[in-house]
Amino acid sequence: MQLKKITSHIYYSEPEKKTDRPILGYIVGDKRAVMVDAGNSKAHYEAYLKLLEEYELPMPEVCVITHWHWDHTFGIHALRQESLAHMKTNQKLREMSLWDWTDSAMKERLQQGIEIPFADTCMREEYENVNDIRVIPATTDIQDQTELDCGGITCQCIHLPSAHSDDSIVVYVPEEKVVFIGDIYGNDLYHDSKRDLEKTKSLYKRLKILDFEIAVPGHSEPLSKDELLSFLGQFIKDR
Ligand SMILES: [Zn+2]
């Protein structure tokens, strides 16, 4: 895992396929830094902190969560900073915080269709012992939008429609024209990988009017606004 620099104020740690570790974002201004997503485990979060140390970057004061999926949230319990998440994200995390994390409980959730095989397989890759999984909600709820002033750099945390997950938040940095989008443009993995076209269309419209040049997704290289819109556009007939 390496730290990649996008602009003088924005970095991200690379994703890892095997254990489905997503990109973790880093935005720094004159006053403070912000982290995007908490990682899929304490180990993932700590690997990210180590990269920041190597680059002598200040510790983030806040972590913003893009959506509830395990790979973006199971590191929350280890965070040394406060965390923000959409109210629906926290609702789901509160529900999951009551679940048992044992081999048999996980198998049962798979059988009931509560969990998906892809997540189950990757969790077992990330965690040597699944009993180590800890799920807690973020410290603060976001409703539709909130703004974090980093000093000369702003993080606008905006709730946007998404076929991937209804609780999606993007972190938009207008000064740098960069937006962290998590998995917002993906299919709904928890409903047979279907895609709701109305939600896709609403997302397309919202992103089209947002003034950005680079989008940083959860699991792949950053892409341009044109690339992102043409990807989403293929699902929309009347745009
Ligand atoms: Zn996701």
Image (cartoon, grey):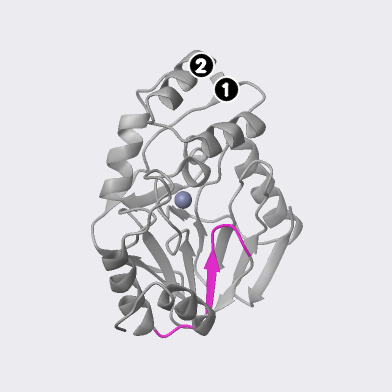
Pinpoint residue 233: horizontal percent, then vertical percent.
Answer: 41, 78
Q: Is residue 15 above or below residue 128?
A: below
Q: Residue 11: which quarter of the image?
A: bottom right
Magenta span main SS: loop
* Left or right of 174 in this view: 85: left
Callout 2: SS:
loop
Give the farthest residue toward the front: 237
Pinpoint residue 122: horizontal percent, then vertical percent.
Answer: 60, 36
* Left or right of 102 in this view: 112: left
* Left or right of 214 in this view: 84: left
Residue 28 visible: no
Q: Is mark 1 within 8 Å of ligand 1?
A: no
Which amino acid type is shown beneath numbered disc 2? Thr
Q: Magenta segment range?
A: 211-220
- What residue lies at 69% left-to-right and 43% top-to-bottom? 18
- What residue lies at 51% left-to-right and 47% top-to-bottom? 38
Callout 2 environment at 10 Å: few (<14), some (14 to 19), or many (20+)? some
Q: Are marks 1 and 2 in contact (CB under 8 Å)?
A: yes
Q: Is residue 125 above or below residue 212?
A: above
Instruction: Name the residue nearer the viewer: 87 or 208.
Output: 208
Tell me, for residue 33, which label it has, or none. none
Query: Residue under circle 1?
Result: 130
Q: The C terminus appears in which quarter of the rendering?
A: bottom left
Callout 1: SS:
helix
Which amino acid type is shown beneath numbered disc 1? Val
Residue 15 within the magenta-colored segment of the rendering: no
Query: Residue under circle 2?
Result: 102
Q: Residue 218: which quarter of the image?
A: bottom right
Instruction: Name the residue nearer the viewer: 80 or 95.
Output: 95
